[in-house]
Amino acid sequence: MAFPHQILLLAVLHLCSLSVWAKVELTMDETVEAYRGDLVQIPCQYNFTDNAKPSLVMIQWFVKAAKSGLRTRIFYSDNDQEMVDGDTEYSTRIQVNSDPQGSVLTLQDVLLLDEREFICQVNGLAAGNAEGRTNLRVFAPPQPPVIEGVLTGISVTNEALSKVASCEAQNSFPKPNITWYRNDLPLVPAQGYVNVVTLVSREPEGFFTVQSELQYKVVREDRHARFTCEVHYLVPGAARTAESRDVNITVHYPTTMVELWKESPPGPVKEGDTVELRCHGDGNPPPPFIFNREQEPEGALGSSGDVLVLTEVTRSDSGVYQCRPQDSQSRASVMGDMLLTVHYLDPVVVVPRDSEVMFKGESLTATCNALSSLETTAVWYKNGKQVGRGHTLTLADATYATSGEYVCEVTVPSLPALRTSGSVHIIVQGAPQLSEEREVELEEATGRLVNLSCEAQGHPLPTISWSIVGTQTWREVVNRASENTAHSVVSVKVTSDVSALCNASNDMGAEVKSFRITAIPLASPPPVPHSPGKHRSLLLKALLFISPPPQNTSSSLLHRRPRSPPEPFSFQLRRTFACLSFLLIQIHRKYGNTGFLMERLWFCSRAIEWVRLWRGGVLARLE
Ligand SMILES: *[C@@H]1O[C@H](CO)[C@@H](O)[C@H](O)[C@H]1NC(C)=O
Ligand SMILES: *[C@@H]1O[C@H](CO)[C@@H](O)[C@H](O)[C@H]1NC(C)=O
Ligand SMILES: *[C@@H]1O[C@H](CO)[C@@H](O)[C@H](O)[C@H]1NC(C)=O
Ligand SMILES: *[C@@H]1O[C@H](CO)[C@@H](O)[C@H](O)[C@H]1NC(C)=O
Ligand SMILES: *[C@@H]1O[C@H](CO)[C@@H](O)[C@H](O)[C@H]1NC(C)=O
Ligand SMILES: *[C@@H]1O[C@H](CO)[C@@H](O)[C@H](O)[C@H]1NC(C)=O
C-alpha cells in the first residue's frame, strides 16, 4: 500500500532540439510511505508536450544509495524491450508496468533498507527527457514497551537521583521516543528532580531498540505513586503511542512519628493479666523499637519487634510506657507513650472476723470491705440466697434462724472479672426453746407403743433427757441434732398411765415438756369421767347422760348379747349424735392416725349396739 503525499513535485525539463522546442512533463509523489513487509507502488507519470510524438521512449528506474548517493539502475525499457536489471537487491522484488502516460514501479516485501530515493527517468530523445524522484519511507511499529520498576527499597535520604524504573521499546523503525509518567502526569526532566537516560541501539536488520531509564528524586509520597512509560512511534500517515503497565516502588523513609497503644487485653487491665503493648511508627521499613518506662528512660524493657509483653501484671506495673525507634537516639522527640493502669481488688475484710456469738434478741452490724482501684459493690448471701446489699449488713433481733454462714461477695461493676468474697459465721446463743406445745395429753390402749417426740432449738445444742414414770419399757428411737436443733423420740409401751418429762437443757437454761398418757385397759370399764382430755370427758358425760353405766368395758364389745326389742327413735338419735360428737372431737384434736379413728368409729357402733342390748335387757326384766 502506498500513501501518496499531497505535495507534488512537478518536474519540468526543457530540452532544446535543433529547431523545435520540445519537452516532457513528469510527475512523481515526493514521498511514499509503507509498512515494512508490505507491497508498495511508486507511480511516475509523464507527457510529451506540443503533441510531440517521439518515435522512441526509454524509461529507466534507479535507486540512490543513502550514504554514497550513487545511483544504481534497477529497470530499463524502450519500445522493444523491458528489463529488470539483474544482480541488484531489487532484481526479484520489482515489477514495472508502463503505458503511454506513465510507469508504475511495484516493490514487494518492503525492507527497512528500501527507505531511499527511487528515480524515474523518461527519455524521448528529440522529444525531450525528464526525471523525477520519490522518497520511499518505511515504518515498523515497536513491540509493546516493557517497564521494570526497581525492586529494592529507595531511600528518600539519597542525595543523588535514584533509578526508579527502566523501559524498553524493541524493534521499531524509525527511532521511537520514550516518555515517563508519574500518576499519569508527564515527568519532564528537571535539574535535581528528574533525569531520563536514553540508550538507542540498532539491530542488524535496521530496527531501533530504545532503552530509557528514569532517574528521580524519591519522596515519601512516592510510596503510593504509579510510574508508567510511553513509547511514541510513527506509522504511515500518523503518530502513535503505546503505554506500559504501572509499576510502583518501595520507598524507604525515616520514622517521624511513633504511636504506642495497648493491643490486648481489650478493656481495662486487672492484676494477673498479660498485657501487650504495640508500638507503631510511620517509617518504612518499620524499625525495631525500644520500650521503657517513663521513670527509667535508660532501662530498656525486653521486647520483641514492635510488641512489649508484660505477663501477670500487678498494680506496680501501672505507669507511663514509652517506645522509640532503635536507630533514632538522636531524635528523642520521635517517641510514643501511653499510660497503663492495672486495676486490683484486694481480699475482702469482713468484720466481725470468722465467727461471732450473739445472744437471742441482740443486734449486730457486719461490714465487708475490699480495697480496690475501682468502685466496688457488696452483696451478702446466706445459704445461697441473697440477704443484703452494700458494705454493711445489720442483723437485728437475732433468732436461732439468724445463725449461719454469711458470705459477702465484693465485685467491681466496671470490671466484672474482679471479684472476691469473705464470710462470717454467726452463732446465736440462747436457752433451749421447744418447738412444740409444752404439755401433751393422750390416751392409748394398754399394751400399745406410743412415740413421744421432743424437739428443742438452742445454742449450745441442747441435750435432751427423758424421765418416764409409769412404764419400764421405753427406749429412744430417734436422736437427731442439727446445728441448733436437737430432736429426740422415745417409744413408750403403755402398761398403765404414764407421765413423761422431756428436759432440753444447755448452759443457758432448760425447758421441759410433759406428756401424760392415759392407759385404756383392754378388759376394764371404759375410761371414767376424770379422764384427762377435756373433750373426752365431755363426751363421756354425754354418753353417761344418754345411757346408764355399762356393765362391761368397751373391750367387751366382742361379746354377743341376745337381741333386745327396738328402742324409741329419739333415744337412738341422741346416741348417734353423741357418737358423731365424739368423732368430730377426735378429728378436731387432729388425731391424724386413721387407724385410730376407724377404731373409734367401730367403738361407737358397738357402744350403740351395747346400749340397745342393755336397755332391751332392762325392759325384759321389767316385763
Ligand atoms: C498530460 O497532459 C494532459 C493533457 O494536456 C493533462 O491532463 C495531464 O495532467 C498531463 N499529465 C502530466 C503528468 O502532466
Ligand atoms: C505495588 O504493586 C504491587 C504489584 O503490582 C501491588 O501488589 C501493590 O499493592 C502495589 N503497592 C502499592 C502501594 O500500590
Ligand atoms: C521524538 O522526539 C523528538 C524530539 O523531541 C521529536 O522531534 C520526534 O518527532 C519524536 N519522535 C516521535 C516518534 O515522536
Ligand atoms: C415410732 O417412731 C419410729 C421411728 O420413727 C417408727 O419406726 C415407729 O413406727 C413409730 N411408732 C409409732 C407407733 O408411730
Ligand atoms: C433439766 O436438766 C437440767 C440440767 O441437767 C437440770 O438443771 C434441770 O433441773 C432439769 N429440769 C427438770 C425439770 O428436771
Ligand atoms: C363382762 O364380760 C366378761 C367377758 O365376757 C364377763 O366374763 C363378765 O361377766 C362381764 N361382766 C359383767 C358385769 O357383765
Image (spheres, grey):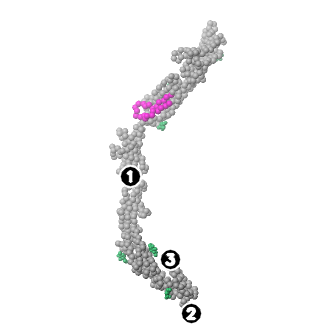
Which quadrant would residue 377 be assigned to in this image? bottom left
For image coordinates 44% across by 31% down, the residue present is 163
Residue 481 falls inside the magenta stretch:
no
Find out if the beta carbon at label 2 lies less than 8 Å from the nearest ligand 6 atom. no
Residue 77 is situated, as x and y percent measured from the top left of the image, at: 62, 14
Residue depicted at 49% across the width and 85% down the height? 553
> Which quadrant: the N terminus?
top right
Q: Is residue 321 visible?
A: yes
The dot on residue 595 is 3
Is the distance from the Cβ of mark 1 to the nearest ligand 2 atom less than 8 Å? no
Q: Amino acid at mark 3?
A: Gly
Disc 1: which residue: 272
- Depth check, front residue: 437 or 549: 549
At which x and y percent is residue 334? 38, 41
Start and end of the magenta stretch? 146-169
Residue assigned mark 2: 623
Q: Amino acid at mark 1?
A: Gly
- Work out how far the residue at label 2 is from the one at label 3, CA to CA, in angstroms: 42 Å
